[in-house]
Image (cartoon, rainbow, N blue to C red):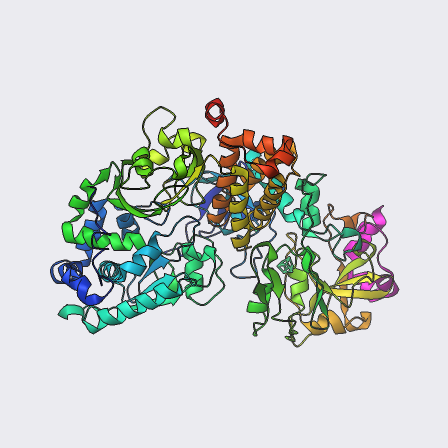
Amino acid sequence: MSEEIAKVKVTIDGITVEVEPGTSILNAARQIGGDIVPPAMCYYSKLEGSGGKCRTCLVKVSKGSEKDPRPMPKLVASCRTTVMDGMEVENITSPEVIEARKGIVEMLLINHPLDCPVCDQAGECDLQNLAYEHGAEKTRYEFERRTFDRIDIGDKVQLHMNRCILCYRCTYVADQITDNRVHGILGRGDASEISTYIEKAIDNDFSGNVIDVCPVGALTDKTFRFKNRVWFTKPVDAHRNCPTCSGKVTLWYKGEEVLRVTARKDQFGEVEEFICNTCRYDTKKTNDWIIEGPTHIDHTSVISSNHYEMAKPLPVIQKDQLLIEANKVEFDRATKI
Amino acid sequence: MARKLLLENINVPGINTFDVYRQQGGYRAVEKALKSMSPDDVVEEVKKSGLRGRGGAGFPTGMKWSFLAKPEGKARYLVCNADESEPGTFKDRYLMTYLPHLLIEGMIVSSFALGAKVSYIYVRGEMMPQIRILEKAIAEAKNAGFLGKNILGSGYDLELYVQPGGGAYICGEETALIESLEGKRGNPRIKPPFPAISGVWGCPTVVNNVESIAAVVPIINDGGEEYAKIGNGRSTGTKLISASGNINKPGVYEIELGLPVEEFIYSDDYCGGIANSKRLKAVVAGGSSVPILPANLILKTITGEPRLMSYESLSDGGFQSGSMLGSGGFIAFDEDQCIVRNTWNYARFYHHESCGQCSPCREGTGWMEKVLHRLEYGHGKMSDIDLLVDVAKKIEGNTICPLGDAAAWPVASAIRHFRDEFEWHVTHPKEALERNYGLANYAEFTNAI
Ligand code: SF4
Ligand code: FES
């Protein structure tokens, strides 16, 4: 007897894919990849229970399944809707979806301070990218935006509640990665805010990951704050033998100096593996790391605006013959032009 | 006089005590169900009755019950939703205050039908007196052997608990209620899974409104078929209506579904007409979240049929010219009421009550409130009106729970039917601060849409 589970067929924007039963529409779309992947501001595959909140991933189900072909009456959150065999989904081919998504982006922005020029996240901000793609150039909102005081969450993280889009990701990190729950949501509606229950510092080894999961600049690394714009820094993959985490990180260089350390992100902006606070905050010397090579940056990102991957390899790498060997592929690519 | 099934004995002195309630024939349904019926018989009876959820959605109760998953070795729960907080709705509070034993009797029979060994009544936190009344009534029922172990020697055990609510409108949404019951923040859950599969503590759960559960008592006493004879079409039985606003006799009325709206408003048995001999301007027929209708459309449907108090008739014409029965919060407005101000008031409520999880509702409710506030206070612009329509459209249907719809509908419908009044607020800002628009020519206007 074969142990294969029957796969289910789903068609998204006319492209058919076979996936495991129980897969969400969003993850099925990610298996196809490309433009038809709905944007996800709150769903995070590594955080159980996340998703369903931001509504940017809304899609139209024009055929429920082979058995029950009726379309679903409303747009559904693709991150929390499981595929059925024979389901047909419209994302970018549906004007209704595009219109609704535009609406969601507008809603996300009405209380956002739009302070990108002074925000550390600018350049790698999911909200910025989303607004660039789906937003209107002008807001119709003419009222005062909600404001909060900045709060320090421990000595390394700062919470800028004004920028928060209440995706709840950081609270899930606090809940699931760290073992003590000290992070939560206070208040209701547009007055709700992320809280550590009255500024109680999170001193868990993995607390720094809230910075990486935050899609906007609400949670930023205080050791990096205002040091540089991300598009002036050069990301390099590196690892070290870390007793606490996988030790696989991205180092962000300016010249020969490591300005910050983050977890590695995949093409959907999610970290590959969570890293510990020691790697993130306390190991910022090149000697601490084994360099693997330049991080692949999507061509649409502003970080690659100066054709970063095509440019000369980093000085740190150039200096060391061993590293030059190890990074032959990158060197070849770089020297082709 | 119309038949009364729930409020029949409401005027009997001492009916809130166990002894008097029992003398009046109370707890007969428990005896009948536990001694002579199987749980499935009870479900069957409720299905036959055609009873539809009285909390607002109008989903058939018997059908909801039959969806309950029954996995081996897992507890099942019945939760009574007594978190009544929809503006304009106060029937459940009335019922719990004066007839607590009717609810408890319904809870016992329904729990028996569903095989629940533990059931909860989740009462809105602000209703402290009702919580005390229910707790006292539960103690009385327990003393008399109607709760606890081996009820009436049938071998069926049931514990009934009262849970004070967390103090938020959103906790009336069934999954938020379950979260709150479990001691968490009252955020609606993302469905699926539905409570029938995974509800309280991850176990299959049914959540029913107070009135739905109370209605199970007459259904079991007289039989589902008898119950289904009352009413009109698929709207069977009687319904409690909370009548308020500019009427002569505000209060809770039990009506047979299918009663003409006109009779309900003008008959002395019910609202007794519009107060101070004014004219009727508009009605919100089912609690603040349903679309508001101008007088002409509430009395007659767009095709000229008399409008009836029933699920179907009130929603006749869709949202273009109809509304919904909802939870039965009937609010009448006379010619002196300002629709803009009222809409702003509702918007303020929904803004305050949004849980803040999903972006369209969290941001959109506040936005609508601010724009309406500006219009009401004479700083509005003509473009604000279309802006409101658009924001409401962007919220509707795109949220996790129905609160988004509930916030969008009143705004969208007020503009649909009373656009001239909104425009007048823009063109006559000073005048709008001093006087109200009055009855105006809304009738012609609605025909144009
Ligand atoms: S602070 Fe960032 S991660 Fe946390 S809820 Fe807000 S936007 Fe999401
Ligand atoms: S990613 Fe699906 S709702 Fe946010």
Residue B434 shows up from this direction: yes
Ligand 1 falls in quadrant: bottom right
Image quadrant in which you'd find residue A274: bottom right
Left or right, residue B367 beside residue B157: right
Left or right, residue A288 beside residue B251: right
Left or right, residue B304 beside residue B421: left
Q: Residue furthest front?
A: B276
Depth check: give the residue in front, A77 or B291: B291
Read off the magenta span. Answer: A308-337
Depth check: give the residue in front, B64 or A329: B64
Q: Is residue B76 above or below residue A23?
A: below
Depth check: give the residue in front, B258 or B294: B294
Image quadrant in which you'd find residue B150: bottom left
Image location of residue A42, percent across then percent down? 59, 54
Q: Is residue A104 one of those drawn in magenta?
A: no
Depth check: give the residue in front, A133 or B216: B216
Q: Is residue A320 one of those drawn in magenta?
A: yes
Image location of residue B276, percent across then percent down? 40, 38
Left or right, residue B295 beside residue B67: right
Image location of residue B393, percent across then percent down? 54, 38
Image location of residue A117, percent across then percent down? 80, 52
Label total for image:
0
Residue A28 shows up from this direction: no
